[in-house]
């Protein structure tokens, strides 16, 4: 197909709507779980501590991503996604009855496991329904579907929480009015699984592989991931960048409100600027790039932009400049994400695609986990040994790490990567404005 549309009956639209509904359910469940944990902790006066329980429950399964990739390679990806949505439908519904932190932790832990299993299957099936030259465009639409549902889920939780729900209904559950959102979330997972029924089953099925898991197959995926130079170099650079980026979300609030003295709402504006930058990159990369022959090089350029912009932001004291540079860092971050996902989809062998994405997400999540656990401690440690703010030192150092990671990617990607995707065939060489509408071609 020459164009991708979400309002159609194409295989792409089926995958997009299912993924967007699933993402909405994930976001709403996470926000409501944090609110419920805080509500439970209010009775004991430690709501700030209990609020992190669902977050911890969702971080721990990060180490299972590689195994989830192996599942995606061994079974029908469509069936995996349907199964995971149905399981999450059941476990999320149980949150309506959650009235203690242990129950809340267990349910979020189980839900995240099946979310992780679903993710590599979704990424691996995209190249089966989208042509290579449309992968960047497809992934930009998937990203928009994923992150556009974030504010919608947050707003809906607020609306539902303010509703006057009948006690006759709440008494069946945990008594918290916001818990009604869990019922709605379970329905979104059910609808997502129903939509996937109409997705055509994968054409490729390697019958020589047994459905018994083996260490050799797991090792094969790791070996391919770490011994393929282009994939390995990109993964290392992005892991360093994710570690550094994690500091933004952990220390950004303190940087703005404590170090610079801005209002509490400033952090929200900063995150909004970052998100707008990501959305802007979706449109830019989507138009100019159909694919690249030097992916590492271009990802490196995006990292240089991100690192330089963040460093400038954390050296600034004027709020308008901070927002501008954070916006630029969002543009670079969005470009990195789209190009990396599209490259892995386009160049990975079909039998290894699930494991490659499983390993990729596992490394990325571990990098974020380490960042979340250490950057705050490092900042506190530096406060005791330097006259300046430890928060600013960590944030500026993180920006430098991203910049260095970009330099590594540029050097490693200087040699041309043999791929069907080339910048010569992109829209960059045919820059023009065209406001004509397009229709999907028959599949």
Image (spheres, grey):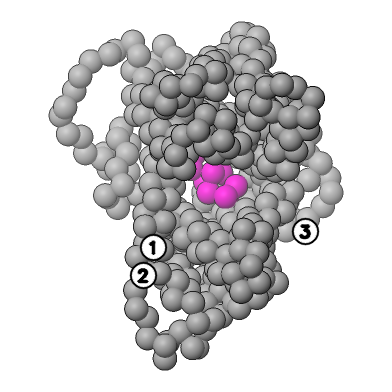
Percent position (x, y) of residue 276?
38, 34
Residue drawn at (63%, 25%) of the image: 392
Assess whether residue 410 is covered by the magenta stretch. Answer: no
Q: State left or right for residue 149 relative to residue 118.
A: left
Residue drawn at (26%, 39%) of the image: 441
Badges 3 and 2: C-beta atoms under 8 Å apart?
Answer: no
Badges 2 and 1: C-beta atoms under 8 Å apart?
Answer: yes
Sequence-wise first label, 3 or 2:
2
Question: Marks 1 and 3: which is nearer the front?
Answer: 1
Percent position (x, y) of residue 426?
38, 17
Residue labelled with disc 2? 162
Please identify the residue farthest to the right as the structure is shown.
215
Q: Quadrant of residue 357?
A: top right
Specify the label residue 158 is tagged with: 1
Specify the label residue 129 is tagged with: none
Q: Secondary structure at mark 2?
A: helix
Residue drawn at (66%, 72%) of the image: 44
Q: Secondary structure at mark 1?
A: helix
Residue drawn at (42%, 91%) of the image: 168
Assess whether residue 127 is covered by the magenta stretch. Answer: yes
| Label 3 to label 2: alpha-carbon separation | 50 Å
- Front one among 310 and 357: 310
Q: Quadrant of residue 440?
A: top left
Please identify the residue farthest to the bottom as the structure is shown.
168
**Badge 1: how crowded within 10 Å, few (<14), some, or many (20+)?**
some
- The magenta region covers 119-128
Percent position (x, y) of residue 80?
58, 59
Q: Quadrant of the N terminus?
A: top left
Q: Secondary structure at mark 3?
A: loop
Q: Quadrant of the C terminus?
A: top left
Specify the label residue 212 is tagged with: 3
**Badge 2: how crowded within 10 Å, few (<14), some, or many (20+)?**
few
């Amino acid at each position: 197909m020459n164009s991708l549309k979400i309002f159609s009956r194409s295989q792409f639209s089926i995958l997009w709507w299912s993924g967007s509904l699933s993402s909405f359910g994930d976001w709403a469940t996470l926000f409501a779980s944090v609110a419920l944990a805080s509500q439970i902790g209010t009775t004991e006066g430690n709501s700030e501590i209990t609020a992190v329980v669902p977050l911890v429950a969702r971080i721990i399964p990060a180490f299972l991503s590689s195994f989830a990739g192996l599942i995606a390679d061994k079974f029908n990806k469509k069936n995996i996604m349907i199964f995971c949505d149905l399981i999450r439908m059941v476990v999320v519904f149980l949150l309506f009855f959650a009235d203690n932190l242990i129950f809340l932790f267990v349910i979020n832990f189980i839900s995240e496991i099946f979310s992780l299993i679903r993710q590599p299957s979704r990424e691996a099936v995209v190249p089966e329904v989208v042509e290579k030259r449309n992968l960047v465009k497809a992934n930009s639409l998937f990203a928009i579907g994923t992150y556009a549902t974030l504010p919608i889920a947050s707003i809906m939780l607020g609306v539902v929480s303010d509703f006057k729900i009948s006690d006759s209904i709440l008494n069946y559950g945990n008594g918290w009015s916001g818990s009604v959102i869990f019922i709605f979330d379970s329905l979104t997972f059910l609808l997502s699984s129903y939509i996937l029924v109409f997705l055509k089953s994968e054409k490729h099925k390697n019958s020589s592989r047994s459905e018994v898991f083996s260490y050799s197959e797991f090792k094969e995926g790791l070996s391919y991931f770490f011994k393929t130079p282009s994939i390995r170099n990109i993964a290392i650079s992005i892991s360093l960048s994710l570690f550094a980026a994690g500091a933004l979300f952990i220390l950004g609030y303190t940087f703005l409100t404590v170090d610079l003295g801005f209002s509490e709402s400033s952090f929200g504006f900063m995150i909004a600027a970052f998100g707008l930058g990501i959305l802007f990159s979706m449109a830019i990369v989507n138009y100019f790039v159909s694919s690249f022959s030097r992916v590492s090089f271009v990802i490196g350029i995006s990292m240089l932009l991100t690192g330089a912009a963040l460093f400038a932001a954390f050296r600034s004291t004027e709020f308008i400049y901070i927002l501008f540079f954070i916006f630029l860092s969002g543009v670079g971050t969005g470009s990195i994400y789209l190009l990396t996902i599209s490259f892995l989809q386009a160049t990975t062998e079909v039998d290894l695609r699930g494991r490659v994405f499983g390993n990729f997400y596992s490394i990325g999540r571990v990098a974020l986990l380490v960042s979340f656990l250490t950057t705050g401690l490092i900042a506190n440690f530096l406060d005791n040994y330097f006259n300046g703010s430890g928060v600013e030192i960590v944030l500026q150092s993180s920006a430098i790490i991203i910049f260095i990671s970009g330099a590594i990617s540029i050097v490693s990607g200087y040699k041309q990567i043999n791929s069907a995707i080339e910048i010569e065939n992109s829209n960059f060489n045919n820059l023009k404005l065209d406001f004509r509408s397009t229709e999907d071609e028959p599949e």
